[in-house]
Image (cartoon, rainbow, N blue to C red):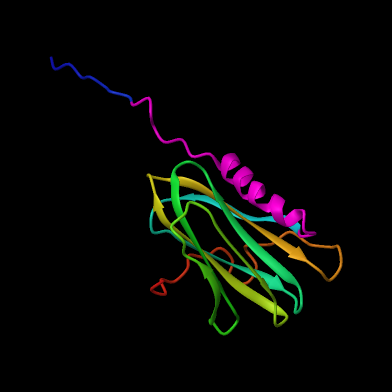
Amino acid sequence: MMACTFVFSSTANAQDPVKSTDDAYSMGVYYKDRDYKMVPSIDGVDGTGAKISFLVPITKGIDYVFLAGRDEYIKDLDIYIYDETNALILKDRRSSSRAGVKFRASYTGTVRVILHVARANGLGAWSVIVGRRGGGERLDPVDPNAGAGAAPAQDNGQ
């Protein structure tokens, strides 16, 4: 009879979505202090190379901020914002575990946000929050399933 030995690692990766959301909101404190209204947008668990795409409605003249937080397994996040003609508005490709961009909308419509997990240690949790300043107090939560929703992004060679 053959003996079997099982080895369990005490350092198994355990993604922490709460940590990623807390991390995003800790970045948002700076903007909240500057009258941005922050709302959750989308979160998930992915590994290196994942690209997550979702739409956010915007209004001309309003300031927006998109902030991406992470847990300890995400090592580098990038974020890209595209307009309705698929032109790149701005990006954050710094080699850092967090990502964030801000801009003033030049039109009313939608932007496509792409979060790229550039580097992770296995699977890691990430969270994107959206902030808005100006144009009234109401800010409805972002619906990542609206329009193109959270369908996987096409690789645009970014």
Q: Is residue 18 left or right of residue 1?
A: right
Q: Which of these two is toward me, 78 or 56?
A: 78
Number of numbered discs: 0
Eyeballing the image, is 129 above or below 17?
below
Res. 118 image quadrant: bottom left
Identify which residue is drawn at 39% across, 32% down. 12
Q: Residue furthest bottom?
A: 85
Where residue 27 sits in the image (x, y, percent)? 64, 51
Q: Residue furthest left?
A: 1
Identify which residue is drawn at 57% across, 45% down. 20
Residue 110 part of the magenta segment: no
Identify which residue is drawn at 68% across, 62% down. 143
Identify which residue is drawn at 63% across, 62% down. 66
**Which quadrant, please, contains the N terminus?**
top left
Where residue 134 sits in the image (x, y, percent)? 81, 69
Q: Residue furthest right?
A: 136
Q: Is residue 108 left or right of residue 144?
A: right
Res. 56 image quadrant: bottom right
Q: Which of these two is toward me, 109 or 102?
A: 102
Where residue 21 sits in the image (x, y, percent)? 62, 46
**Which quadrant, please, contains the C terminus?**
bottom left
Q: Is residue 55 left or right of residue 88?
A: right
What range is drawn magenta here?
Answer: 9-36
Where residue 131 sits in the image (x, y, percent)? 71, 61
